[in-house]
Amino acid sequence: MPVNVNEDACIGCGACVGVCPVGALSMNGDGKSVCDEGTCIDCGSCVSACPVEAISQ
């Protein structure tokens, strides 16, 4: 199951994008993180990297 990004809590820092080993995370037009569910391997790297806990498994 892919991770869930709370776009209301996301501050757009991009920390999650940099740590994703498969490139499943990117920034949308609003500067918020989004997850490509088909690519996400649910490793949790982004959950640990998020400074505001906007990503959950």
Image (cartoon, rainbow, N blue to C red):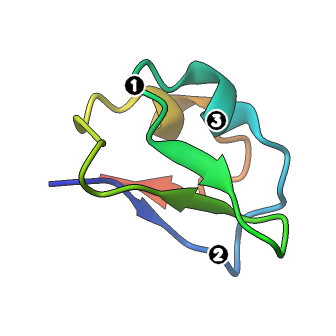
Q: Position of residue 40 (x, y in %)?
A: 30, 42
The disc, 2 or 1, on the residue closer to the chain's N-terminal end is 2
Q: Quadrant of residue 2?
A: bottom left
Please, is residue 53 above or below residue 29 in the view?
above
Q: Secondary structure at mark 3?
A: helix
- The residue labelled by disc 3 is 17
Please, is residue 4 above or below residue 50 in the view?
below
- The residue labelled by disc 1 is 22
Between the C-alphas of marks 2 and 1, the distance is 21 Å
Q: Position of residue 11 (x, y in %)?
A: 83, 61
Given contact means CB atoms under 8 Å apart, are the residues at marks 2 and 1 in contact?
no
Between the C-alphas of marks 3 and 2, the distance is 14 Å
The kind of residue on which mark 3 rests is Val
Q: Secondary structure at mark 2?
A: loop
* Crowding near the residue tagged with mark 3, few <14, some 14–19, many ≥20 C-alpha atoms within 10 Å: many
- Residue at coordinates 49% horizontally, 31% vertically from top-left? 23
Q: Quadrant of residue 22?
A: top left
In this orientation, which residue lies closer to the viewer: 26 or 57?
26
Q: Position of residue 51 (x, y in %)?
A: 73, 41
- Locate the N terminus by quadrant: bottom left
Q: Position of residue 33 (x, y in %)?
A: 65, 58
Tell me the number on the disc at residue 39. none
The kind of residue on which mark 1 rests is Val
Q: Residue furthest bottom?
A: 8
* Crowding near the residue tagged with mark 1, few <14, some 14–19, many ≥20 C-alpha atoms within 10 Å: few
Given contact means CB atoms under 8 Å apart, are the residues at marks 3 and 2 in contact?
no
- Residue at coordinates 61% horizontally, 30% vertically from top-left? 49
Instruction: Report the side of 38 relative to 6 (left or right).
Output: left
- Residue at coordinates 58% horizontally, 21% vertically from top-left? 19
Tell me the number on the disc at residue 7. 2
The kind of residue on which mark 2 rests is Glu
